[in-house]
Image: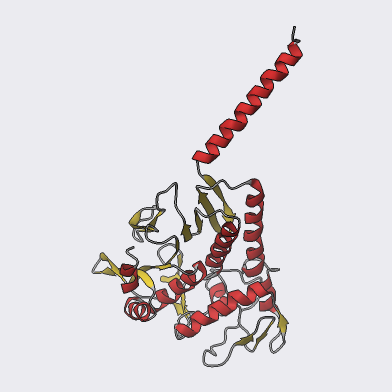
C-alpha cells in the first residue's frame, strides 16, 4: 500500500508537470512582452517568438551599454567624457562610438548641414539636456571644421558638445533587432520612445504601427502602416508637438536649426520616415527633414529615395503628404 508521502509526491509531480505544460502552451500561443525605462523614455519588445530570461538579460545589457556610450545625461558616458576633453588632442574612441558619429556625419553631409550632432551646448542652454554646472560659451563657427574622426580616434577643433539624442534611440533599436535576429528570434516589434522596427510577423499576420496624430494629446493614430510587403521596416517620427517649453512668451522646441542655432519654426507638424535598411538612419533622417521643413524636405526625400510621410498644417487643417518612395512601398 502506497504511503501518504509517496502519494503526495506523485501528485506534486503531476501538478509540476501540468504547470510546465501550461507554461509551454501559454508561451507557444502568447507573445513575449518585454518593457522597461531607459534614455528618459520607455522601451518595449513584442515578439511572437518566446524570449527566454537569458535573452532578456542580454537585451538589458545592450540597452545599458548604449546608454553608457551615448547619453548626454550621464557625466561618465563615453560621449560626455569626449565633450569634456581638450581641443586639438587625439582622443581614443570605441568602435561603437565611431559607428554612431560616422553615420551621423554621413547624414550631415547628405542633408547639407540640416542635421548636426554638435549642438549639445545649445540644447543644454535651452533646457533640453543637463549642463553639469558648466558655463556654456557657444561659438558660431559653422563654416569651420569642427572635428576629425577615424575608426579609433577623434580630434575636436572647436569647443562644442556632441548630442546623440537624435540618433541613439534608433541605433539602440537597430542593435536589439540585430541581436534578436542573430538568435533566430525573427518575429518582433521593437519600440524605444517611438523609434520602431517591425520584422517578420505576429502569428502569421503583419505587424501594424500607428502614426501619432500630432494634434491629439492622447496616443491616437492618424494613420497606420504595416510590414505586409516587407519583412523588415524601421519607422522613426520627429515632431515638436510634445517636446517644447515656453520662455519669455516664446515657444522653445527641442529641435535646432544648425544654420541659426535656434529652435525650428515651420508648418511641419511631424515627419515619419520608413526605412528598409536601418533604424539608425531613419532616426537621423527624420530629424534632418524636420529641420528642413515640408517643401525642402519633400524635395530631399524624393531626390534620395526616402519613404516619408509629412503631416503639415494648412489653415488649421492637417494634410498628409507622402513621398514617392512611401507609395512605392505601399505603406
Most extreme residue toward the top is 1
Q: Position of residue 116 (x, y in %)?
A: 51, 80
Q: Residue at x 57, y 87 (%)?
A: 139
Q: Nearer the viewer, residue 20 or 69?
A: 20
Quarter of the figure with residue 182: bottom right
Rendered location of residue 196, percent (x, y): 47, 60
In this image, 92 relative to 135: left or right? right
Q: Quadrant of the C terminus?
A: bottom left
Foreground: 62 or 167?
Answer: 62
Q: Residue at x 55, y 40 (%)?
A: 27
Give the residue at the far bottom of this rendering: 144
Q: Does residue 202 appear in this view?
A: yes
Q: Give the quarter of the figure containing the N terminus.
A: top right
Total labels: the figure holds: 0
116, above or below 219, in the image: below
Question: What scheme was used to colour the molecule?
Answer: secondary structure
> Does residue 46 appear to the left or right of 136 in the view shown?
left
**Which residue is at 30% across, 68% downward?**
327
Splitting the image into 4 quarters, where does residue 264 fall? bottom left
Residue 260: image location, x then y, percent: 46, 84
Residue 248 appears in the figure: no
Residue drawn at point x = 62 percent, y = 60 percent: 63
Asked which quadrant contains residue 96, the reply is: bottom right
x and y percentages locating residue 143 in the rendered image: 52, 92
Amino acid at each position: 500500500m502506497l504511503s501518504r508521502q509517496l502519494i503526495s509526491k506523485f501528485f506534486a509531480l503531476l501538478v509540476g508537470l501540468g504547470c510546465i505544460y501550461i507554461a509551454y502552451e501559454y508561451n507557444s500561443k502568447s507573445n513575449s512582452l518585454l518593457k522597461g525605462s531607459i534614455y528618459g523614455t520607455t522601451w518595449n519588445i513584442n515578439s511572437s517568438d518566446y524570449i527566454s530570461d537569458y535573452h532578456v538579460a542580454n537585451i538589458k545589457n545592450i540597452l545599458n551599454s548604449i546608454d553608457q556610450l551615448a547619453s548626454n545625461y550621464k557625466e561618465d558616458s563615453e560621449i560626455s567624457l569626449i565633450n569634456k576633453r581638450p581641443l586639438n588632442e587625439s582622443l581614443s574612441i570605441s568602435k561603437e562610438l565611431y559607428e554612431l558619429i560616422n553615420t551621423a556625419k554621413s547624414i550631415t553631409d547628405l542633408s547639407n548641414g540640416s542635421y548636426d550632432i554638435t549642438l549639445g551646448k545649445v540644447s543644454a542652454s535651452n533646457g533640453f539636456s543637463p549642463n553639469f554646472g558648466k558655463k556654456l560659451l557657444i561659438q558660431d563657427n559653422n563654416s569651420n571644421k569642427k572635428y576629425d574622426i577615424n575608426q579609433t580616434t577623434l580630434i575636436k577643433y572647436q569647443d562644442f558638445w556632441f548630442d546623440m539624442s537624435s540618433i541613439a534611440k534608433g541605433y539602440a533599436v537597430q542593435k536589439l533587432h540585430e541581436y534578436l535576429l542573430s538568435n533566430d528570434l525573427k518575429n518582433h516589434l521593437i519600440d524605444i520612445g517611438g523609434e520602431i522596427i517591425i520584422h517578420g510577423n505576429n502569428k502569421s499576420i503583419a505587424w501594424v504601427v500607428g502614426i501619432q496624430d500630432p494634434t491629439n494629446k492622447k496616443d491616437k493614430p492618424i494613420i497606420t502602416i504595416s510590414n505586409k510587403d516587407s519583412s523588415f521596416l524601421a519607422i522613426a517620427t520627429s515632431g515638436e508637438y510634445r517636446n517644447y517649453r515656453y520662455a519669455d512668451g516664446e515657444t522653445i522646441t527641442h529641435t535646432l536649426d544648425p544654420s541659426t542655432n535656434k529652435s525650428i519654426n515651420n508648418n511641419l507638424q511631424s515627419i515619419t520616415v520608413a526605412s528598409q535598411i536601418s533604424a539608425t538612419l531613419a532616426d537621423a533622417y527624420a530629424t534632418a527633414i524636420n529641420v528642413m521643413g515640408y517643401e525642402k524636405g519633400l524635395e530631399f526625400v524624393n531626390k534620395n529615395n526616402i519613404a516619408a510621410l509629412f503631416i503639415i498644417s494648412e489653415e488649421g487643417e492637417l494634410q498628409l503628404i507622402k513621398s514617392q518612395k512611401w507609395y512605392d512601398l505601399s505603406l
